[in-house]
Image (cartoon, grey):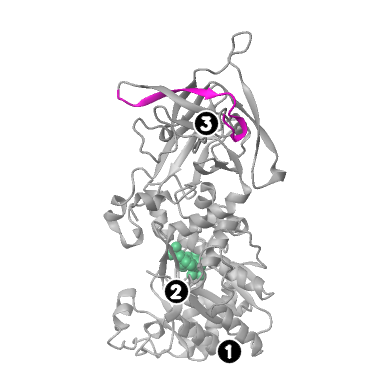
Amino acid sequence: MPDPAATNSPGSPEAQTDFIRDRIRADLAAGKVRQIQTRFPPEPNGYLHIGHAKAITLSFAVAEEFGGKCNLRMDDTNPEKEAQEYVDAIQEDVRWLGFEWDQMVYASDYFGQLFAWAEQLIEKGLAYVEDQNAEQMAKGRGTVRTPGTNSPFRDRSVAENLDLFRRMKAGEFGDGEKVLRAKIDMAHSNLNLRDPAMYRVRNLHHQRTGDEWCIYPMYDWAHGQSDSIEGVTHSLCTLEFEHHRPLYDWFCESLGIHHPQQIEFARLNVEYMLTSKRKLLRLVEEKHVDGWDDPRMPTIRGLRRRGVPAEALVAFCKHVGVAKVNGTHELSLLEYFTRDWLNSRTWRRMAVIDPIQLIIENWPKNDDGTPHVEWKDVKNNPQDEDAGTRAVPITGKLWIDRDDFMEEPPKKFFRLGPDREVRLRFGYAVKCVSYDKDDDGRITTVRCTYDPESKNGKTSDGRKIKGVIHWVSQEHALEADTHLFEPLFAEADPASFDGDEFASILRPDSRRIVKAMCEPSLKDAKGGDAFQFERVGYFYCDPKTSEQGSPVFHRTVTLKDTWKKQQGK
Ligand code: ATP
Ligand code: MG
C-alpha cells in the first residue's frame, strides 16, 4: 500500500511540514497558544515498541522545533496490569532514544483533582451514579444504527449522586457495583458520548497511591484532564482516538478548564513486526522469544540489543512522518536508516561466519621452521582518518567463507574456484590449485598458491584480479558466538493473525547461532560496540551476554537488502 507520508526517498531532507505542524503554526500565528506543550503518555503495562518510538519522536521533536516542552506522563490509571518495572523501563527507553522530558508526571498525581472535578460535574447535573451492571449498560448503549436507552438511574438527584459517589470513594461498594457516568446523550450518533463511564470501583492496590483509592478513572476522563492540568497545547495521539475527541472536548468545555487541542495521526506499522503490547506480551509469556529485549522483538530494547542505533530509529521515525491514514512501512526502510548511520561510524573488521580453510601451499616458513606470520597495519575505518589502525596477522592457514568458493562457478563469480584467482583483502592474490571435501561432499579445504609480489593491489605481471574476499588467520582467530536473525514471522502482516494461527506463522529459523572466526582484535570488543564485518554486515557486541575477551555478536543488519532478494521481490 502506498504510504501517503512517504513523499521523500530515504536520505533526502526530512519533510519540514505536515498537518500537525501546520496546525501548530496556525495556532501560534492566531495567538491561540504561546508556548507549545506536548506530552508522551504511555501506560506502564509493558515495554515500549517501535510504534511508541514514533509517538515519542513526534511529540518531543514538535516541542523542540517550536521551542516548547514535552512531558513524560505515566498513564497509570489501571493498576491491575501496571508495574514499577515498566515505569523504569519506559524512562530508560525514552532517554536512550535521546529525548529528555520537561516534567515526569503520573496521571495518579491528579486523582485528587479528578475526583474534585467529577464532583463539579455531578453538581452541574452532568454526571450520575449508575447501579446497572456492565452487561445491562452495554445493552442500554444501543448500536451504531439504534439509539441507546436512558438508564433508570439517570435522573438521580445531585444530592443522591454526590452521596453515592463519595461512598464509592469511601469503599462501600464492591467491584462493578457502581459506576460514575457522564450525562450526555444516550441517542448520540457517536457511541462514545452515550453516557460514558468516568469511574469504576476497583478494589486494587495501586503501585503509587497504595490503598488510597478504590475507584479509578477511565481513560477518557483521566486523559484530557491530565493534559489540561499540564497546560498541554497539542495532545498528539493515534487515530483510534479520533472518535473520542468529541468526548475529550466535552469534558474540558463542561468543566470550563484549559482546553488542549487533540490531533490524531496514523499508527506506525512495520512489515513483519507486531506493535501491540498485548501480543508482544504473549510472545514473551509463551517463550517464543527470550524476553522483551530479545533482539528479534520490535521493542525499543529489542532493537537496541539488535544494535539499531537510537539515531537511526529516530531518523526512521522522522522520515515516515505523520499520516492521516494507517499504512505499513517496509522493513527495508528501517534497515536503510540503520546502515546509513552505521556505515560512516563503525570500525571495519574481518570475520568468517561459515568457515572453510584456505591453505597457501607456498607460504614461507621462518628460519626455525615455524610458519611465517606477517602483520598488516589496517585502517579501522577507511571513511574516517581519525579512527586509527589495528594489526591484522596473515599466515599460510586461513579461514574463508564457504560462499567464496564454488566447485563449478559461473563466469561472473569473481571469487574462488578451481584455477581461479582472487585477492585476499589487504593481502595477496591467491590461486586455487586443489580442494578437499568431506564424506558428505562438503568442501573443507581450498588449497592455493600465492603471488608474493601481489601486495598493494599489484600483481607480479600486471594481470588484473577482479574479486576480493575476506579471511582470518586460523592461528590467531577468535571464535565468537554470532547470532544471525531473520524476521520473527513468516508473514509480513502478523497483526492480522490471532489465536492459534499466531504461533504457526513464527519462523523456526528466526535466530541462527554460529561460531564465527574473527580477527584477533575483536577480543577487545566491549558490550555496546558496533562493527562492520566486511562483506557480511553490521554487528553489535551484546552487552548482556558478552564477557571480557569473549564477545557475542548480534547481526544488526546485512550489508545489502538480501531479505528482499530471498523473497524474490
Ligand atoms: P499497545 O496497543 O501496544 O498497548 P497503546 O496505545 O495501548 O499501545 P500506550 O502506552 O497507551 O500504548 O501508548 C502511549 C502512546 O503511544 C499513545 O499516545 C499511543 O497513541 C502511542 N502509540 C502506541 N502505539 C503506537 C503506534 N504503533 N504508532 C504510533 N503511536 C503509537
Ligand atoms: Mg493505550
Considering the numbered disc 3 on the image, is that residue within a helix, a strand or a loop? loop
Instruction: Between label 2 and label 1, give the one nearer the viewer.
Output: 2
Residue 493 appears at what percent x and percent y? 35, 60
Residue at (54% x, 20% y) in the render: 396
Q: Earlier in the sequence, mark 3 or mark 1?
A: 1
Find out whether residue 73 is within the magenta segment.
Answer: no
Q: Are marks 3 and 1 in contact (CB under 8 Å)?
A: no
The image quadrant that residue 133 belongs to is bottom left
Residue 256 tag number: 1
Instruction: Between label 3 and label 1, give the one nearer the viewer.
Output: 3
Rounded to the nearest whole Å, what is the CA distance between mark 3 and mark 2? 45 Å
- The N terminus lies in quadrant: bottom left
Find out whether residue 443 is within the magenta segment.
Answer: yes
The amino acid on which the numbered mark 2 sits, given as a three-letter code, is Pro
Whether the residue under disc 3 has CB within 8 Å of ligand 1: no
Whether the residue under disc 1 has CB within 8 Å of ligand 1: no
Mark 3 Cα shell of 10 Å, populated few (<14), some (14-19), many (≥20): many
Give, as a single range, the part of the protein colored magenta.
440-459
Label 2 belongs to which residue? 4
> Does 224 sit above or below residue 409?
below
The amino acid on which the numbered mark 1 sits, given as a three-letter code, is Gly
The amino acid on which the numbered mark 3 sits, given as a three-letter code, is Trp
